[in-house]
Structure formats: C-alpha cells, structure tokens
Amino acid sequence: MEEQQRLPEPVKFTSYLTKREIICALIWLPVHLFVLPVAAGMLLQNGTVNEAQANLLIYGISSVYILLAEFTFLRREFDPFCDRKLYCVMQVLSHYLVMMAMNLFVSGIISGAETLFGNGGVIDNLNNDAIIELAGKDMNVISAMTIFLAPIVEEVIFRGGIFCALRKTSRTAAYVISILLFSVYHIWSYAIYDPSYWIYILQYLPAGFLLCRCYERTNSIWCSIFFHMLTNDIALTALTALSQKF
C-alpha cells in the first residue's frame, strides 16, 4: 500500500529579521501612530482630503515605506509560503476558525460587563463604528486600506519587528508584549478620552495571539498577512451588512 500523504509538520522558527530590518520596522511605529495622523488631520481640517482619504493616505505612505524598507524581508518570507502552500493555507483557515470561537467567548465577557457602565449597556466599539461610517462614504477607499494596506503595515511592525525582536530572548515576552501593543494600538485613541473603553482591548487579544501563532507555525510573515487580510475582509463585509440592515 502506498503511504498516505500527510501535511508537513511545523518547522523550527527561523523567520528572524536582521538588525537593520528590525530597526526599520520599529522606528516607523511612532511615525505611523502619531506623525502621519497629525499630518493627515491638518489636511482634513483645511479641506484638502476627506476622512476616508486621510486614512488611506496614512496607510498608503506607511505601505510604501514598509515595501521599500522591508522588501528583502518580504521577498525572503515568500519562499516558505510557496514551499508549503497547502500547509500554510490550512493554518490560515484553521486559525481563523479558532479566532471566531475565541471572539464569541470574548463577546460574552464584554456583554456581561454591561452592568459596570451606565445607560443600559457597554459603549459601542468606536473603532468599528468609525470604519462603518467611512465605508458608507467611500467603500472602495476603506476596502483598500482595511483589507490590503493595513495588514501589510501592521504585520511587519507588530509580528516582524516586535515579535521577532523579542522572541530571540523570550518567546513568552514576544507573545505578551506584541499582543498587548497590537491590542492597545487599536483602541488607545478612544480609551484616553473614556477609560471604560479599555474593555475593548479584549476584542483584539484573540487576533493578536493567533496572528503571532500563525506566523510562528508557518515560518512566513505572509501567512499572518493573509490571515489578517481574511479577518479584515470578512469583518468589513459583516459590519457593512449589519449597518445597512439596521
């Protein structure tokens, strides 16, 4: 009998960036987080761009920088994906299913916390509300930003830069710090005005953990990028559909 073909086992994690690549990734985080939003906000105030275009400008500039500064890393990372396409695709899909289950659990925790807040319940996720509002104004621009540009920028910074830099010293620290920073990144601009909004950090913990795990198990940053793209695509579609329904 012929031996049944099985999916290859996970390989040892060797997807480390060089010092130059790590520095290039990390120095861009404050630029992407503070400098570009301030510049885009100035253009927004004087009417040069609208809100959707301002967000696209931020992620567009960051994407160009990442593609130029990290081209060698991204090209190098594509080989492991191509060598183990079936395994990588299965990892992306399985991690997405696990994330859906974890998100249901987290949603239950947040719903149960409604007694901690007034007005009959927990405040809405303002990040999601902002995306829905912008999508209603310019769906093509928001789709390009959310599905294609944001995953590349965020994965290279949070998984490539932060996770890889820390994993050489401590795998636990790499997971904890990269997950927390990724989660805080999505809510800090709202939470600084309303402390109750910090509860929504829980919504981003499953994705932060599973993006790290998908990257680690496949040895390719492209797998976490594709996982991130898939997540954002389905989330944007679902949020838009729900907003139109209600």
Image (cartoon, rainbow, N blue to C red):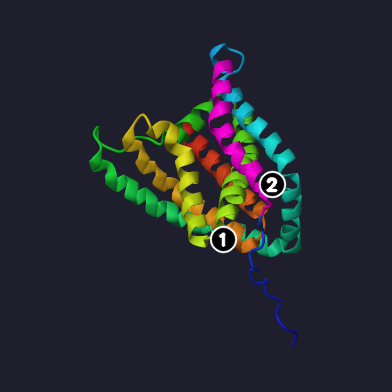
In percent of width and height, residue 21 lies at: 68, 47
User: Which residue is rendered at x = 48% and y = 45% of the image?
Assistant: 181
What label does residue 20 carry, if any?
A: 2
Q: Position of residue 84 (x, y in %)?
A: 72, 64
Left/right placement of residue 43 relative to residue 201 reads right
Q: From the viewer's perspective, is residue 168 above or below residue 178?
A: below
> What's the mark number on residue 136?
none
User: Dot 1: few (<14), some (14–19), or many (≥20) neighbours within 10 Å?
Assistant: few
Say what amino acid the circle numbered 1 marks: Ser
Residue 151, quarter of picture: top right
> Looking at numbered disc 2 in the image, what kind of residue is underneath it?
Arg
Q: Secondary structure at mark 1?
A: helix
Badge number at residue 94 = 1
Could one spot residue 96 in this view of the protein?
no
Residue with the most extreme top position: 46
Q: Quadrant of the N terminus?
A: bottom right
Quick one: 26 or 33, which is closer to the camera? 26
Secondary structure mainly formed by the magenta segment: helix
Local SS, label 2: helix
Q: Separation of disc 1 and disc 2 at Cα?
A: 33 Å
The residue lying toward the viewer, choosing from 175 and 183, is 175
In this view, the residue farthest toward the bottom is 1
167 lies above or below 129: below
* 95 horizontally vs 180: left or right: right
Q: Which residues are magenta?
A: 17-43
> Residue drawn 58% across and 60% down?
168
